[in-house]
Image (spheres, rainbow, N blue to C red):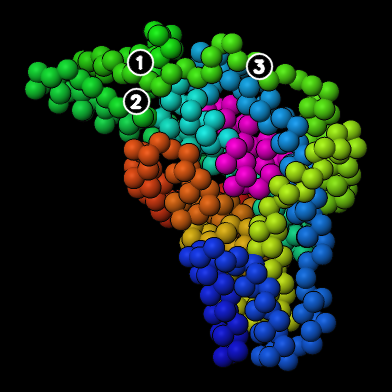
Amino acid sequence: MVLSVVAFAVLVGAFVVGSLTRVSAGLVALVAAFVVGTLLAGQAVEDVVAQFPSGLFLILVGATLLFGVVRLTGTVELLAAWAERLAGGRRLLVPVLMFLLTAVLTSAGAFTPAAIAIVAPVALALGSRFGVSTLAMGLVVVQGANAGGFSPVNPFGVVANLMLREAGAADGTLRLYVACFLFNAVLAVVAYVLVQVLLGRRAARRDDGASSDGATPVASGAGVALPDGAATSGGSRTAVLASPTTATAVDVAPAGPAATEEPVRLTPVRALSLLGLVALLVLTTVLGVDVGVASLAIALVLVVVSPRLQKPAVEAVPWSAVLLVTGIVTYVGVLEEMGALEQLQRGIESLGSGSVAALVTGYVVAVVSAFASTTGTLTVISPVVVPVALDPALTPVGVVTAVAISSSVVDTSPMSTSGALLMASARPDEERRFFRALLLWAIAMVAVVPLVAWLLFVQVGL
């Protein structure tokens, strides 16, 4: 028992080091696996090496390499340009298209932080141009990333699908993906509407106060709704913020690139990249081809067509993230061999109900994931989730879906990578407001979502 406590304390220490310093938690966990495994648990070095997840490594490298190639072809910029063109002057389409663009990227295998890093600056800029709250746009982008995050080729989905396979529900891959997509889509709508309504009320109160003082109402461009067809002049847009009694002129940022800028065009290699992404989804979800093998094969085709992409694509693979996941998986394997995870499982089983255990697990992963890597959290909790999912009274897909959603919806926390990326994409004068708002949203997600997900997917069985 004491040995297990020490082993878990080392794992927590790895997460703390990874969160507070630039040292990879995966590297700490990988080295700790040999120290704990050989010195404390008496395992041979060969036994520790055998815990390294070679199959998972192949999937992560293959998927991220393919996404790197696709990004270098300019396909992402093409999708963003199409999204802006589709939106035209229709403000409500902007968050929808940004949600879908981020979801497409993560569905194709992009790490969630990578997709957010690409889309968030574009989304927040479009939000300012169309008068949509930048905070609302940021939340929509994160939910879009999570919506596609549980595809079979995304690291989130890879770990979740490993749980399904171990629970004997390998055929639940598509159901998991669709459930997570729809849940995050609904959550994105809730976030967008809630933020827009709250900001609108706050702006209305500000305007009423200014009017009662006889002053000219002035509002900040951040988070202000710009009506369709608002007047434009001199490269900038003037928004009219309407309330029941006032109309406020607001200067919004210039309307983006000059008209003379060359548009992003559909080239043969970009068309081939789009076909490759479609082929990847078909091969993995319909035909059951290994994700790593399919990703590497499609990446090879693109590299053969355009050899100059190979070097930068290999360099663009997020090796630190690969090290994080594989290092933690290796350490978890050592924990499993020494019986530490079995003791944790018995503790959860002592709750007396698989359903209650699923709810408790959902809250645990939500709290931990708000401060640590979602992929790492899912990896650590995986051996605990599988026995709960095997409860005859529950459905494995429902349990895994509830845990997956609970672990990912808190990614808006400013202490997480996704939340930090949103803050980095915001204007300097918005950083403090973003921090407070993202923290409050993450707290709300921790409090509410695990219960809702448990009710929908574990109790009701959707």
Dot 2 or dot 1: first in sequence order is 2
Q: Mark 1 is on which residue type?
A: Ala
Q: Is residue 343 above or below residue 431?
A: below
> Which label was assigned to residue 70?
none
Q: Nearer the viewer, residue 443 or 291?
A: 291
> Which label was assigned to residue 239?
1
The mark closer to the camera, 3 or 1, is: 3
The reply to whether residue 400 is visible in this rendering is: no
Please name the predominant secondary structure of the magenta segment in the image.
Answer: helix
Query: Which residue matches tag 2?
Result: 221
The reply to whether residue 413 is visible in this rendering is: yes
Residue range in magenta is: 95-118
Residue at mark 3 to residue at mark 2: CA–CA distance: 27 Å
Q: Is residue 294 left or right of residue 398?
A: right
| Residue for point 70% across, 84% down | 37
Dot 3 or dot 1: first in sequence order is 1
Q: Is residue 213 above or below residue 278?
A: above
Dot 3 or dot 2: first in sequence order is 2
Q: Residue furthest left?
A: 213
Q: Mark 2 is on which residue type?
A: Gly
Q: Are marks 3 and 2 in contact (CB under 8 Å)?
A: no
Q: Is residue 213 above or below residue 119?
A: above
| Residue for point 60% across, 65% down | 24
Q: Secondary structure at mark 2?
A: loop
Residue at mark 2 to residue at mark 1: CA–CA distance: 9 Å
Give x and y (percent) for residue 227. 40, 15
| Residue for point 53% across, 75% down | 13
Give x and y (percent) for residue 168. 79, 61
Q: Are marks 2 and 1 in contact (CB under 8 Å)?
A: yes
Give x and y (percent) for residue 422. 48, 42
- Label 2: few (<14), some (14–19) or many (≥20) C-alpha neighbours in 10 Å: many
